[in-house]
Amino acid sequence: MAVQSEDSGCAEAAGDPVALSRKEYSVSSRAAVLEGPRRLQLRRIAIPDELPAGAALVRIEGGGMCGTDVHQYRGLAGAAGQPPPYPMVLGHEPVGVIERLSPDASPGWGVSVGDRVAVEPTASCGVCPRCAAGQRHQCPDRQVYSYLPIDRAPSLWGAYADYLVVLPGTVLHPMPAHVEIADAVFFNPLAAALSWTIDVGGTQRGEDVLVIGPGQRGLASIIALKEAGAGRIIVAGRERDGRKFDIARSLGATDVLEDLDVADAVLDITGGRGVHRAFDFTPAPDALRLAVAATGRGGTVMYVARHGEAGLPADDLLRKELTVKTALGAESAAFAQAVAVLASGRHDLSALHTHRIGLDDVDLAVRILAGEVDGQDAIHVTVVP
Ligand SMILES: [Zn+2]
Ligand SMILES: [Zn+2]
């Protein structure tokens, strides 16, 4: 196994990157390795002379962090039920520059050495019915970055590192140079938001919508719903931090309701009709009840977080003939759309970017995003090598 472990904790083990020669950089990569639940270490991993067949080597410029990182850190299974295969390099939302291409790399990528790219989180077979339908995240043979163990050579399967090895079957999106790195790595949550609210959720121009939970996903969805031309964008949540409601307004929310017991308020805002679509981004059982109560006849309720056995109010769903939709990952087309939206500069995302953290402090970054660090309230965290 081409991995050298450093023996002290994450923060101390980093070394001083400035002291490293260019030569050292080119033969090895620092990588934030999750060894087990809550055990993160910065290691140095050799960069292979020869890439796996069809692969690319990407020099990481930044990686976005989301709730999945927190799940992995805490030892919980992923959304699709997969347990974290420790030890593994964390990070699955990378943006970087093509450093090297294997001689048989896919011409379909259409990229050259030196190109800046956003890397989709999944390598998939590309030919099965799910892949053909654009649902590459549901491919039975999918491989998800950061969910590959470092035992598998060449080990560099995560975004929180200097370098990432990209497998064939991964979709790469050219990322324009003018998109600032924190915005650029937002391609992943924005793709999910576009996929959930428009491609799967079906939002049409002029429709009234309810967004429950103004966290990273909910706020990204406001951007997506603006892109869809939604009418009233009502945001409800029980956030500790009122700032998230301010950000929701700045992104285009027309109404904010700082509680979840607000079905009557939603009906008032919509002239008694209820919203056309409600999107629940929380794991709270009363959020699902709000979504159902606030949605008008024939409308759609969508949720994307696990709710355990909480259950939906079946009779209310039936009485109003509501449609229930769910989603886990983003559909392929949404990633390209997300890059286009970011490149357009139509939305000011600066208020979302609460933390930019180096490789030395990935452990701290995950704990901040998890809400475990007093005085730190994170929305979007970018890890930069
Ligand atoms: Zn993610
Ligand atoms: Zn497939």
Image (tube, rainbow, N blue to C red):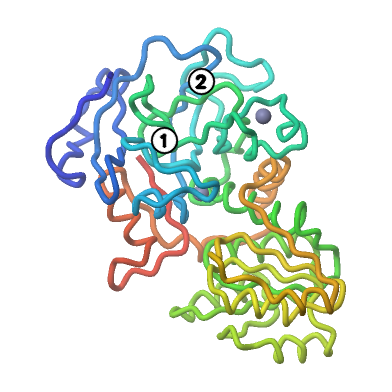
Which residue is farthest left? 8
Q: Residues within 10 Å of mark 2 (few under 14, many from 20)?
A: many
Which residue: 62% across, 70% down? 311
Residue 56, label in figure: 2
| Residue 217 in the image: above or below residue 134 | below
Residue 158, label in figure: 1
Q: Amino acid at mark 2?
A: Ala
Q: CA distance from mark 2 to mark 1?
A: 13 Å
Q: Amino acid at mark 1?
A: Gly
| Residue 339 in the image: above or below residue 316 | above
Q: Image quadrant for the N terminus?
A: top left
Secondary structure at numbered mark 1: loop
| Residue 6 in the image: above or below residue 223 | above
Report the front residue among 62 and 314.
Answer: 314
Secondary structure at numbered mark 2: strand
Q: Is mark 1 within 8 Å of ligand 1?
A: no
Q: Quadrant of ligand 2?
A: top right
Q: Image quadrant for the C terminus?
A: top left
Which residue: 62% across, 53% down? 190
Report the front residue among 68 and 42.
Answer: 68
Residue 327, image x, y percentages: 66, 53
Which residue: 58% across, 79% down? 286
Which residue: 28% across, 25% down? 45
Q: Residue 125 sits in which quadrant?
A: top right
Residue 268, image x, y percentages: 77, 92
Q: How many marks?
A: 2
Report the front residue among 359 and 137.
Answer: 137
| Residue 352 in the image: above or below residue 250 | above
Report the front residue among 12 and 66.
Answer: 66
Q: Residue 241 sits in which quadrant?
A: bottom left
Residue 128, image x, y percentages: 72, 27
